[in-house]
Each structure stands twice: as structure tokens, then as C-alpha cells.
Image (cartoon, helix red, strand yellow):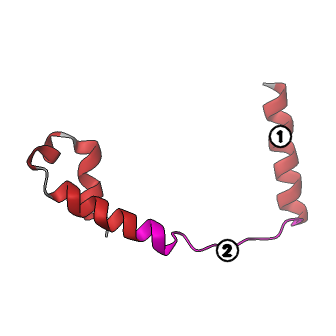
């Protein structure tokens, strides 16, 4: 617990001092997007996909 508190204190200090550099990255690479597109297309073919609510959202990704 003490370790977590120290980490939080260090984070707050860095934020207050603005001693960090923001890094902007592309959210998904083209390879990842292509994979998700193909994966969602395959999932749409599975008739029982709606029996798995945690997977249903994947068919609407791309």
C-alpha cells in the first residue's frame, strides 16, 4: 500500500511540474485494422455469435 501511495505522489509531482512529454501515437496500425476487419467479417458468419454478448461488439468494429 505504501508503495502505491509513493507512486501516486511521484505521478502528482510530475504532473504539477509538467515534467513529461506527451507522445501521440496512431491508435491502430493498418495491419491491426485489417485483422479486425477480417475478424469481424468472420464473426458475422457465425449464427450463434449473439449468444456471446461479450463478442457481439466485435462484429461492428470496422
Residue at (27, 55) in percent of width and height? 57
Residue at (13, 50) in percent of width and height? 46
Describe the element under mark 1 as helix, strand or loop.
helix
Residue 51 position, x and y percent, is 14, 40
Q: Quadrant of residue 15?
A: bottom right
**Is residue 51 or residue 43 the one in the foreground?**
43
Give the magenta-colored segment's residue range.
18-33
Quadrant where the N terminus sits is: top right
Q: Eyeballing the image, is 4 above or below 8?
A: above
Mark in front: 1 vs 2: 2
Mark pair 1, 2: CA separation: 24 Å
Q: Earlier in the sequence, mark 1 or mark 2?
A: 1
For mark 1, what is the residue? 7
Q: Quadrant of residue 41?
A: bottom left
Residue at (73, 71) in percent of width and height? 23
For mark 2, what is the residue? 24
Residue at the outermost top position: 1
Amino acid at each position: 500500500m505504501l508503495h502505491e501511495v509513493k507512486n501516486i505522489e511521484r505521478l502528482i509531482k510530475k504532473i504539477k511540474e509538467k515534467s513529461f512529454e506527451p507522445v501521440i501515437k496512431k491508435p491502430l496500425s493498418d495491419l491491426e485494422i485489417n485483422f479486425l476487419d477480417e475478424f469481424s467479417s468472420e464473426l458475422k458468419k457465425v449464427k450463434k455469435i449473439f449468444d456471446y454478448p461479450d463478442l457481439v461488439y466485435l462484429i461492428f468494429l470496422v
